[in-house]
Image (cartoon, rainbow, N blue to C red):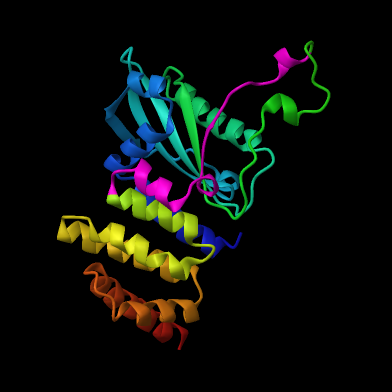
Amino acid sequence: MNKKIINTHDKFFKEVFSRKEEAKEFVEKNLSEKLVKNLKLDTLQLDTTEYSNKNLKTTFSDIVYNCEYKNNKTIKITLLFEHKSYSVTNPYIQLMEYILRIWKMQIKQKQKLSPIIPIIFYHGREKWIKNSMENIIEGVDDNLIKYIPKFEYELVDTNTLTDSQIKTIYDSFELKASILLFKNIFSNFENKIRDILIELNSITDPQKRDYFSETVATYIYSNINTELFQKIIEAMKNDTIQINKKFVSIADFLETRGIEKGI
């Protein structure tokens, strides 16, 4: 995928999921109920350590949270945003490399090793096919299976969710709007934008609403063609929902800045 496109997705992903409240709800809604009961999600704390190397960054963006478990031990929850627009055949290799980097860092800092829960967020064009390590490696039978590394990851694939399900699953308007945006950015986007902005319109704090509108407008501007962007702006100028006025003013500014930069 184009490096510039990766960066725009990366920035928006980190903008949304670096917020503790959004991350907390996302984790709560996408891990098993039994596991969530043992997590003290109020203790979530963003880990600013850099764990990805140059190679891993071309595969996914990462956000890491430290969280207390029921035994008062700290575990790590990693939110991994898959850059590729297609399903990856074997993500375990990249995940193993990533997990080992975290553990090596802990060893270097003379810390005890933490359990790591990887959650992959994927919004590509085709459905993600999840497989197991033993099925990926050829020739594994009952005698060999004990030599195969075994671990799991959680998967959130927007292809498996309808827009209605996303609106039902999540409570945060920012989270709903963001996941709807990630899900629909690649296709039929023109018909979905109003629904996304309606979710933003429900944010009660005006300052928070305006800031997030700017973030969303910038992400959209960076990921759709100019003709469609202009078409969306024109359609919104006559719309009645309040958020559109702010969105249109931001969009006009971005478009003007883009034209000036081009000149």
The image quadrant of residue 198 is bottom left
Q: Give the residue at x 55% y 34%.
A: 98
Q: Point out residue 145 in the picture as x, y percentages from the top left corner.
A: 73, 16
Whether residue 145 appears in magenta in the rendering, the answer is yes
Q: Give the residue at x 42% y 55%.
A: 180
Q: Give the residue at x 48% y 35%.
A: 119
Q: Point out residue 36 in the picture as x, y percentages from the top left corner.
A: 36, 24
Looking at the rendered structure, the number of numbered marks drawn on it comes to 0
Whether residue 57 appears in magenta in the rendering, the answer is no
Image: 121 above or below 110: below
Q: Residue furthest bottom?
A: 263
Image: 206 above or below 18: below
Of 71 and 236, the residue lying toward us? 236
Q: Which residues are magenta?
A: 144-172
Of 208 and 236, the residue lying toward us? 236
Left or right, 179 with reference to 247: right
Q: Is residue 20 visible?
A: yes
Instruction: Locate the N terminus and report the quarter of the image it occupies.
Output: bottom right
Image: 113 above or below 196: above
Q: Is residue 11 visible?
A: no
The image quadrant of residue 168 is top left
Instruction: Locate the C terminus and report the quarter of the image it occupies.
Output: bottom left
Q: Give the residue at x 48% y 59%.
A: 184
Q: Residue furthest front?
A: 164
Q: Point out residue 217 in the picture as x, y percentages from the top left corner.
A: 35, 68
Image: 62 above or below 131: below
Of 53 and 19, the residue lying toward us? 19
Q: Point out residue 10 in the picture as x, y percentages from the top left corner.
A: 46, 54
